Image (cartoon, grey):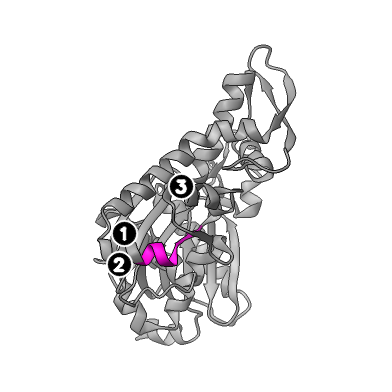
């Protein structure tokens, strides 16, 4: 009874709990939070020092007693307590401007397709402990399709490829359900690792995650560009331990990430192979939709289109498709009941 009363004064939230970024959506304001999924903790006092963007700036720069933790690995909670604290921080931040003393919102959260029942329970428990009144779980690829305004409830096929930070979700959706799918632990983080490994092997230079990510964003591409690009990269020389700078170009980065891109494409093909022929003909007609931060890699749509011989298009604002999908479901309970993840518990 008290929860329902407090719920009337709370803002219902759609949350994309991503490996790299957490986004929060409210019905009245749209996306209100878009921050890295990082929490900085003082291990001596167990006190949270920073969450989100401020905590990300501390990654790789902290003294021994301060840890910058990324509590989600491959889209799954790896540190329950830190995830709970991070969610509570974001829920409280959303309600900071209102007069709600104890927020009790309804929450819709996106989860990976291959998540286990135990992992689902961990997400639900973390959200509940952080203050949620009711928790609904939805597959991220379904949320991405809804956010991209695809006709998910109709008897026509929608193929979504959601390339996030920790996972790539490939799914064929029809009549409010996922007909064929693959979930890969190959996504933005793996591409960053590819770049860091290439620089280490080719130049004997050690670079950090954030530098590798900057290289990917600045000059990364999946297909050859009309104009060559290059950038200066600084790291530590593994031979003498001193700082060193080199110049990387786009063809070197393409070589570094080609294996991961090819694996994603091969899995798209193998998903199509197990899709019913009637749905394949729909996909051939309507094309494949790309979402997630990885969809912003230059030329990846052309590379997939060339390999599959199916039209490929980027969803509008691919980074926010999942959270916009959860936001749409907050105000459409009928659709939410149709697409809710099996075994999702409601509190």
| Quarter occupied by residue 64 | top right
Measure the alpha-carbon separation of dots 3 and 2: 20 Å
Query: Pointer 1 and pointer 2: residues touching (CB < 8 Å)?
Result: yes
Determine whether the residue tagged by mark 1 lies in a helix, strand or loop: helix
**Residue 314 drawn at (x, y percent):** 54, 61
From the image, tell me which residue sits under label 3: 166
Residue toward you, 251 or 58: 251
Is residue 43 something one can see in this rendering?
A: yes
Residue positioned 36% across, 58% down in the render? 171
Query: Pointer 3 and pointer 1: residues touching (CB < 8 Å)?
Result: no
Task: Point out the tag, 3 or 2, that comes first from the N-terminus.
Answer: 3
Measure the alpha-carbon separation of dots 1 and 2: 9 Å
| Quarter occupied by residue 238 | top right
Tell me the number on the disc at residue 120: 1
From the image, tell me which residue sits under label 2: 341
Q: What range is drawn magenta here?
A: 282-291
Task: Point out the tag, 1 or 2, that comes first from the N-terminus.
Answer: 1
């Amino acid at each position: 009874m008290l929860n329902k009363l407090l719920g009337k004064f709370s803002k219902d939230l759609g949350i994309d709990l991503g490996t790299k970024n957490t986004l929060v959506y409210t019905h009245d304001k749209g996306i209100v939070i878009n921050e890295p999924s990082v929490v900085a903790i003082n291990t001596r006092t167990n006190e949270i020092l920073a969450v989100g963007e401020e905590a990300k700036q501390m990654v790789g720069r902290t003294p021994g007693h301060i840890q910058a933790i990324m509590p989600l690995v491959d889209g799954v909670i790896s540190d329950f307590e830190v995830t709970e604290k991070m969610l509570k921080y974001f829920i409280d931040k959303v309600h900071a401007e209102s007069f709600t003393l104890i927020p009790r919102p309804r929450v819709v959260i996106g989860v990976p397709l291959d998540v286990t029942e135990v992992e689902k329970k961990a997400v639900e428990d973390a959200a509940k402990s952080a203050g949620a009144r009711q928790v609904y779980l939805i597959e991220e690829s379904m949320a991405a399709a809804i956010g991209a305004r695809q006709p998910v409830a109709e008897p026509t096929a929608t193929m979504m490829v959601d390339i996030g930070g920790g996972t790539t979700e490939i799914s064929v959706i029809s009549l409010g359900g996922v007909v064929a799918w693959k979930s890969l632990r190959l996504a933005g983080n793996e591409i960053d690792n590819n770049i860091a490994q290439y620089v280490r092997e080719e130049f004997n230079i050690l670079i950090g995650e954030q530098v590798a990510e900057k290289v990917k964003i600045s000059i990364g591409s999946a297909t050859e560009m009309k104009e060559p690009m290059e950038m200066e990269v600084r790291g530590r020389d593994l031979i003498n331990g001193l700082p060193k700078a080199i110049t990387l170009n786009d063809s070197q980065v393409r070589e570094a990430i080609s294996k991961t891109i090819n694996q994603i494409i091969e899995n798209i093909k193998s998903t199509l192979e197990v899709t019913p022929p009637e749905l394949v003909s729909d996909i051939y007609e309507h094309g494949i939709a790309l979402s997630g931060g990885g969809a912003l890699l230059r030329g990846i749509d052309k590379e997939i289109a060339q390999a599959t011989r199916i039209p490929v298009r980027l969803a509008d604002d691919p980074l926010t498709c999942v959270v916009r999908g959860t936001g749409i479901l907050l105000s459409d309970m009928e659709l939410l009941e149709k697409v809710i993840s099996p075994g999702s518990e409601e509190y």
